[in-house]
Amino acid sequence: MNVMRTNRSHERTRGAIIVEAAVVLPLILALFAGFVDFAWVLNDLQSVRQETREVARDAVVGNSGATGCSHSAGTVNAATEGLICEVKSRLGSDVVVRLELPDTGGYVEGNAVRVCVQKPYESLTGVYATMINDGAATVKVESRIEQVAAVAFESFSEPPLTGQSWGFCA
Amino acid sequence: MRSDERGAVLLIAAASLIALLGFATLIVDLGDSRQLTRQNQSVSDMASSAAAIELSSSASDHHATDNAHLVAADFVGRNLDVSIASTVCRTPNADLLCYAAGDTYVEIETPHAGLSSVPAYQQVWVNVCSQSSGFFAPALGLAPSEVCRDATAILDETIVISPAILALDPTGPQAFHLEGVARAVGVGGSLVANSSSSSGFHMKDATSATATDPTSCICAVGGVSLAGAATVSPIATAGSMVATDPWASLVEPTVISSGSYNSATKTFAPGLHGSIILDKPGTYTFSPGIHEFTGQFKIEGAGIHVVAENVLWYFGPGSSASASWASGPNTIRVSSRPSNEYYGGNNGEFPPIAILQARTNTNAFSLGDNVSVGHVSASGCVVDSSAGITGGVYLPTAELQVRGNTGSGLCTEGAPVVAYRVQIQETGFVQGATDGSAGTSTRSTRLAD
């Protein structure tokens, strides 16, 4: 008699744990996914910031990388395309780039170079994809030209990412 | 499970979730703070680099610190998309200027303009601070914290100085020294002490040192020490690069034949001369060629005029060979041999030196009162066919001593004065020039680690 009651009690307990776990586990998983996605987004932002700085530095000392990458900046000279390709080789082909020469006189020593980059955020876990995937890491760096390149860099702009604009690059 | 234990998992999970949410908010806010830190670091880097470039581009004033401040502030504003304005510094400092915009506070420090202690490798320090309020911290009643990041940009300079007057002594104090109302002028070139001593270039009393070319310097490898009413133009620079001895590889000439003197015409033929003492008035001529002095060349009379065109006066290795010119009024005119001439025994082209002292001869080259080796006036010095030196003066191991009174002094054109030490006293005047080769400067900026 007692044995039967105990067995039944265990079954009820097991069921209760499963039900309670079913309620709690998604919350914990959602929280965990949030940690992962947040860290992923933050990492993206840091990477974009770092690489934008690197490219801005190259622009102000007259360096540029190899040409031949796929981009949507239209027709630009080889030095300028080298800059675009440098960004894409460092951050991936899904980034878009814009380079501006905001000061009068354009690409001359002492003037500024403004480099802006957009990289789409991506939810690594997929849990927050609808919230994250519409956003983008946007970074603007403005640096001063120290030494001009043999071939002057030109202003260019790729089209902004869907749902984004270059407003932050003004 | 007893009936009163049901829901315990939910309770525990709820408690755990609250703790996890707490951690989550902490992580999010720390992430935000970290992101702000990186942003401020980037802004500091860009602003300090831009300011260092400003120092670099101001060739006429190596210490254009005012502009550097403004440029740094401008680039902080450009990168943060804010319009920043000058504000009072939290920690007042004579070298510090501060700016603010909203919750952003910026400190910019550059060396003081015009100080002789400003190092050659100038630095610009920028510190950018922003308030990190976080997303969740305000809800928890936590006050915003301030995130500051700083950067130091260094202006590297590689300057090849073209000296007009150069003191070669590498370590001695006061290697280039002026006192009384002495003057030193560099025409188209710099006045340089290669001494690493903190007083390598030393001036006191009412002396003056001038480099006519504003891109040239009054500089010393060690320090520039100014006392009394001493004036320099442009400003003095300590910690400069060592100026290259333009004639370091010079092979000294070998003179074999004896020189002679024609008393009727008061003319010296080239060759070896023992001691020469000119103490009677008249015009003495040195014929073209190399004149090597093995003893003293002394001028101690009055009304003595010496003309030596197309010569090299060589104070040879003899222990007593030296120049001591005073009394007067006397005038001395010397011009060098053609610079493309090959001297016997030399392997290369001889430079345009008019007066040379052997490296083994450390006797001082002394110029006293009333001797005009150039027509000295308040505005400078003129070299012509009656006074002055066309060509260089090279005393690699000897001291150049110039005293004298108003109107007397030693002036060169077309080449510098290079001596181991340069000592100008009383009303002494020395004017050197460059050989036409311009100094060069290569500058670049970098961020300090």
Image (spheres, rainbow, N blue to C red):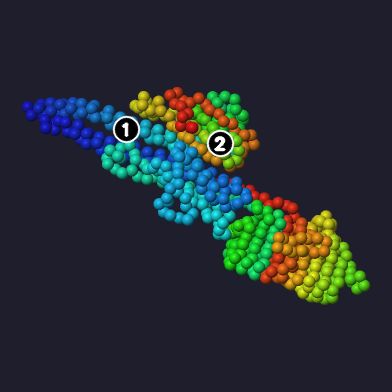
Q: Residue at x 30, y 40 (%)?
A: B137
Question: Quick one: quadrant of the N terminus of chain B?
Answer: top left
Image coordinates for residue B406, horizontal then vertical, percent: 72, 68
Residue hosting label 2: A103
Image quadrant in which you'd find residue B379: bottom right
Q: Are marks 1 and 2 in contact (CB under 8 Å)?
A: no
State which mark lies toward you, 1 or 2: 2
On screen, residue B13 versus residue B257, left or right, reads left
Crowding around mark 1 (Cα neighbors within 10 Å: few <14, some 14 to 19, many 20+) is: some
Secondary structure type for disc 2? loop
Number of callouts: 2
Q: Amino acid at mark 2?
A: Asp
Residue B273's place in the image compared with A46, above or below, is below
Q: Specify which label sits upstream in the sequence, 1 or 2.
A: 1
Is residue B143 visible in the rendered structure shown here?
yes
Residue hosting label 1? A32
